[in-house]
């Protein structure tokens, strides 16, 4: 009976469900598998995801409710010294540097100076092989002696020529007296012939004697003229011999000079900076004298040749102060004064520079010729000037203050934003000297101790980080 009752009770629901609509039927419950009963990790993962999502939503809400971060900070206006400078590079060198060369060719036979040696003017620092020049000098001296002997010979010739002239002139006088005597005899014989006291033959003989005497006189005169011409020729030969002596003497002097040039002497007092030859090396002097030594006059007084850009050269004046450093002594700063700015331009790859000469004292001999100097020249300076940072001139407020700043933007007058009663107000200024970091205030409603706005150093980076991450909100800095 009990079994039948239970069966009827189990069948009643089935009958009831058959009579109800089908959409109210519930699916049979899923049978729980052993794997689901043994894997609870999935529930913890789901819980962690929900927690992270809730935290992110909270942080996003907090970042959206935080006011935007300011993009400026405030600095105090102070007084100080400011200088305008020009930078350049240059080379350190001695004030006087002499290249010692040779004017004759030959082999180096001796060296008496080396690197860093101190030398005196006139001191022998090298010698060339003098054998060839010694032979040339000896030959020139022999030629001089020969020319001098020819001079003496020419003088003897002049003496002989003068004697011949005197003898010829005596012959002329003798011939003249013979002519006079013959003329007298002819005249007397002619008178006697007119008186018929003598024969005609005597008159003819007297006439022939007169004619012969006249001819002999003419011959004597010609010989006298020839003797005079020979005397003139002898004097010309003497002058030529004397000229030969001068020429031979000049050749001997030139040979002596070339011989002396085989001895190389220091032209100035100084220090040997470089030596370009060794013993046995042959040097050839042609169109350009070969350099043997480089001597610096005084290394305690140096100069720097600075290459100044053409855009800055107009600001330099002789007497301006300059400071520079060298790589060999990075911790030392050397000072000097600009002595001149050379007019000759230097054009390298279409870049024009001018050379400024800076005089520098070098008592410690730290500066060496050829060092590269990084130069800063002071062209103007102010003492106890009211200074503002250049970044304050570039600051502009956010869009909330754009309308108020429109007059400042429209005007080309420089302006800064000054904090007045907790807000920023524009202040127009007249500016003076600037060094690229700070600027002098010449006039304007700005006093020492006022606070002005400057953009943050990392303004763009801060904005990008604030937009990308709500975990790092920016706060205003005072």
Image (tube, grey):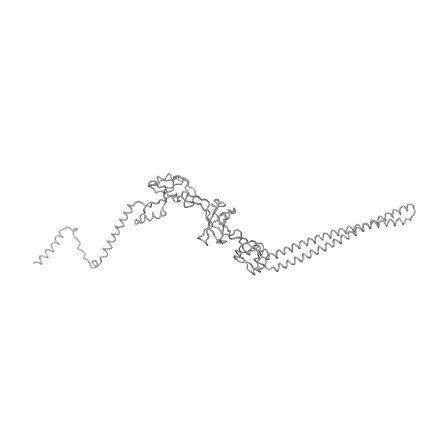
Q: Looking at the picture, how far across and down is residue 162, in whole percent? A: 76, 52
> Farthest residue toward the left?
1
Q: Looking at the picture, tell me which residue is in the foreground, 92 or 7.
A: 92
Which image quadrant for residue 252? bottom right
Q: Looking at the picture, how far across and down is residue 335, in whole percent? A: 47, 49
Q: Looking at the picture, tell me which residue is in the foreground, 29 or 170.
A: 170
Q: Quadrant of the C terminus?
A: top left
Give left or right: position of 437 versus 230: left
Figure label count: 0
Which image quadrant for residue 84? top left
Q: Quadrant of the N terminus?
A: bottom left
Give left or right: position of 222 versus 403: right
Establish if 328 lies above or below 81.
below
Q: Looking at the picture, how far across and down is residue 62, in whole percent? A: 28, 47
Q: Looking at the picture, how far across and down is residue 52, in whole percent? A: 26, 52
Q: Looking at the picture, tell me which residue is in the foreground, 168 or 273.
A: 273
Give left or right: position of 356 versus 52: right
Establish if 460 lies above or below 35.
above
> Farthest residue toward the front?
363
> Farthest residue toward the bottom?
280
């Amino acid at each position: 009976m009990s079994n039948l009752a239970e069966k009827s009770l189990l069948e009643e629901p089935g009958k009831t469900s058959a009579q109800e609509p089908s959409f109210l039927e519930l699916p049979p419950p899923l049978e729980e598998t052993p794997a689901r009963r043994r894997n609870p990790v999935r529930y913890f993962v789901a819980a962690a995801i929900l927690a992270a999502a809730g935290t992110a939503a909270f942080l996003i809400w907090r970042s959206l409710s935080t006011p935007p971060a300011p993009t400026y900070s405030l600095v105090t206006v102070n007084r100080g010294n400011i200088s305008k400078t020009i930078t350049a590079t240059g080379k350190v060198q001695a004030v006087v540097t002499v290249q010692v060369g040779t004017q004759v060719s030959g082999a180096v036979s001796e060296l008496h100076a080396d690197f860093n040696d101190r030398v005196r003017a006139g001191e022998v620092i090298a010698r060339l092989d003098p054998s060839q020049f010694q032979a040339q000098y000896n030959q020139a001296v022999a030629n001089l002696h020969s020319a001098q002997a020819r001079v003496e010979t020419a003088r003897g010739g002049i003496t002989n020529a003068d004697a011949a002239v005197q003898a010829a002139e005596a012959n002329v006088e003798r011939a003249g007296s013979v002519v006079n005597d013959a003329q007298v005899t002819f005249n007397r014989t002619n008178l006697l012939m007119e008186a018929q006291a003598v024969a005609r033959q005597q008159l003819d003989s007297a006439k022939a004697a007169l004619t012969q005497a006249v001819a002999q006189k003419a011959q004597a005169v010609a010989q006298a003229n020839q003797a005079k011409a020979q005397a003139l020729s002898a004097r010309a030969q003497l002058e030529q011999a004397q000229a030969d002596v001068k020429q031979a003497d000049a050749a001997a002097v030139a040979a002596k000079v070339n011989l002396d040039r085989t001895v190389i002497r220091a032209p100035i007092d100084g220090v040997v900076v470089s030596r370009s030859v060794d013993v046995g090396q042959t040097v050839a002097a042609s169109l350009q004298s070969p350099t043997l030594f480089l001597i610096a006059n005084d290394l305690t007084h140096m100069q720097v040749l600075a290459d100044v850009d053409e855009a800055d050269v107009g600001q330099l004046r002789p007497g301006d102060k300059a400071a520079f450093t060298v790589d060999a002594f990075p911790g030392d700063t050397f000072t000097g004064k600009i002595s001149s700015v050379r007019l000759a331009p230097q054009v390298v790859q279409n870049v024009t520079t001018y050379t400024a000469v800076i005089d520098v004292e070098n008592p410690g001999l730290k500066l060496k010729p050829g060092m590269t100097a990084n130069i800063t020249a002071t062209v103007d300076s102010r003492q106890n000037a009211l200074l503002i940072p250049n970044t304050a001139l570039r600051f502009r407020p956010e869009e909330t203050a754009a309308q108020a700043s429109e007059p400042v933007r429209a005007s080309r007058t420089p302006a800064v934003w000054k904090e007045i009663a907790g807000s920023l107000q524009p202040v127009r200024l007249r500016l003076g000297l600037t060094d690229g970091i700070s600027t002098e205030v010449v006039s304007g409603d700005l006093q020492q101790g006022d606070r002005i706005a400057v953009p943050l150093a990392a303004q763009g980076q801060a904005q990008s980080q604030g937009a990308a991450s709500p975990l790092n909100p920016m706060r205003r800095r005072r």
